[in-house]
Image: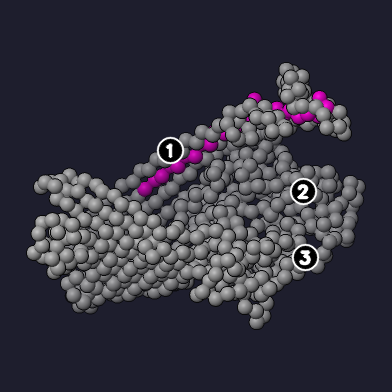
Amino acid sequence: MNFSDGFSSFKADNRSTAQENKWPAPTWVFNDLLTLVRGKHTFKMGGEYRSLNNTYVFVRNEAGSFNFDRGQTGLLGVNSGSPIASFLLEQVDSASVDWRPFGLQSARFASYIAHFGDTWKVTPKLSLNLGIRWEMHPPSHEAHDVFSFFDPYGPNPGAGGRPGRLTFAGTRWGDASYGKRYPEEVFRRGFAPRLGIAYSVSPKLVVRTGYGISYDSALTPNWQGGIGSSGFNLSQSFGNGLAGLSPALILSEGLPTDYAKPPFLDPAYINGQYIDGYTSVYRPLDGNRLPYSQQWNLTIEKEFTTNFYISAGYVGSKGTRLYSHTAPLNVLDPKLLSMGNALYDEFQPGQTELNGVKLPYGGWVEQMTGCPPSVAQALLPYPQYCGTIQGVTENAGNSTFHSLQLKAEKRFSQGMWFLGSYTWAKLLTDADSAQPDALYGSHWVISPFERSRNKALSVDDVPQTLVLSLVYDLPVGKGKRWLSKSNPFVDAVLGGWRLSTIFRASSSTPFYFRSGQCNVPGQFGVGCIPAILPGANPFAQDKSSFDPSKPLLNVSAFEPVDRFNFYYGVGPRISDLRGLGYHNQDVSLTKSFRIVERVDFQLRADFFNFWNWHSFRNFDTYIDSPNFGYISGGATAPRYVQVGGKINF
């Protein structure tokens, strides 16, 4: 029970309605591996079967929610009444109840894997690794076919027979059945060859190269395993009357029952509403075409002394059919932006044409309860649905990665170990994450009619990274270079200390710029992306002498906010401008004291961010913001020191 005017609610927890989620998700894995050695060959072969279960039990609001307001005990237009008084008189202002005869959703996944490999010692200097792997991961399905989804091709009887309907998995739902347990076509050609070559030019010089393909397992990126439930459950609401003076119901009489109960096996059931990706889902027919990555490398390793070597390598990869948000179905061509304000005009009941655009079908205006029946909505490929209809298993993304990787290591000897690495890399992609909705600001901003603009630097692209690590036993104390003959007390205090340090420096990730003021109808599925004006300097100050009290970026260097009026900009999805780089050094000092033969005490002091450097990571990059270019948070932690001890035995 909920009360207005700030009174506490009666419910099970701090959520808007009392609910309980049970989420058993057992996984069964069966595999076997056989190794066979024959002469110069070592064969390995095997297979694996995985059964993944995702049973989602959602118990919510079956007993109903009741809201009390002052209106039922007050006077119209007068500040009067009390929600507590309304409660005492059982005058419920509004109520809701969930009817869930199919509250249990049991998503099921399976994987089939077979592999064969041969490690072949061709000569004492040459080794080959040959292998092939096959994978098949059928799409997720619901164990009892309690699963509905958007079919972009089936005729919708409630939309004049035009394509695009709600359909129901399997064959148990009569004429509304899809005929299959999932919409995707099963991909069975998941063959992944691998090749590795190692050649010893000399005892101290080795060359390695390799190529391989790896497939993703194609798990649906969705909390419910990609299982939609539209038509199987119902959330029913009850409202007040007489401008709030009349109650929705009397509490002691309970909730009304005179409404239709699910299931609603109607292809037109969600007409006029959103396909939200959760309750109602769209899974593209080619969504089971497995994402895959091609990887290759060439590495040279040279040993200069017994304890010191250097390696240099080129490492590259190409991702194909990655999970993406680049090809929604229900969007308008940007050319239609030339219609201007006419796109916002709304059809009225009985109107068959508006601004030269015909009514999609009879009854459409009354059907559109989820969004206005505007001209822009009428022009969509699927005007019977609100929203862009984004595929939850869309995998139209691509990426390319190239890098130079250098490493030098001095193995531990004479009290010292050192490792240094440097990477120079570039990552281009149009799919920055396995779940791009986690990076909303960097996606869903380019029209699918202009998909070539999607590929850009990754939001995680870091072109240069340097890491130096050192462990050094200080040459002080008994048996060392300095104070080797000191007395036991001096040796206990000054001798036996070990210094460890890690230094890291890297470039910044790239900026992406947007405008929050963006007068473009949502039916275009774009965001406003300002471009840098010709000849303008986007930086307001030099990064090498950055003053945190001033903006780093110059807003006047970008297209002005007032330009984004039925125009969404020509800037890149991700720019090539970068913020301030990152650098940090941590230092540790440790010393062990022998207590008895098998017991010692270790004392250590750790200095994090030893030099107290500050790296500023996040900046406001929305040009309509009054804080554009200023730090928006994300500064690295200041120096802090911790001292500790432990006993080893």
| Crowdedness near tag 2: few (<14), some (14–19) or many (≥20) residues, C-alpha within 10 Å | some
Mark 1 belongs to which amino acid?
Answer: Pro
Q: Nearer the viewer, residue 144 or 546?
A: 546
Secondary structure of the residue carrying tag 3 is: loop
Image x and y of residue 415, in percent: 18, 65
Q: Which residue is mark 3?
A: 566
In the image, which is nearer the foreground, mark 1 or mark 3?
3
Mark 2 belongs to which amino acid?
Answer: Cys
Q: Which residue is mark 2?
A: 371
What span is colored magenta in the figure? 48-74
Query: Would residue 237 be found to the left or right of residue 494 on screen?
Result: right
- Separation of marks 2 and 3 at Cα, in angstroms: 20 Å
Residue at 17% across / 44% down in the picture? Answer: 649
For the N terminus, the image quarter is: top right
Task: Tell which circle, 2 or 3, labels the residue nearer the N-terminal end.
Answer: 2
Q: Which residue is mark 1?
A: 26
Task: Tell which circle, 1 or 3, labels the residue nearer the N-terminal end.
Answer: 1
Question: Hey, which quadrant is residue 310 in on the image?
Answer: bottom left
Query: Would residue 46 be found to the left or right of residue 496 on screen?
Result: right
Image x and y of residue 252, in percent: 73, 17
Q: Nearer the viewer, residue 130 or 199?
A: 199
Residue at 65% across / 79% down in the picture? Answer: 536
Colouring chosen for the image of the structure: one colour
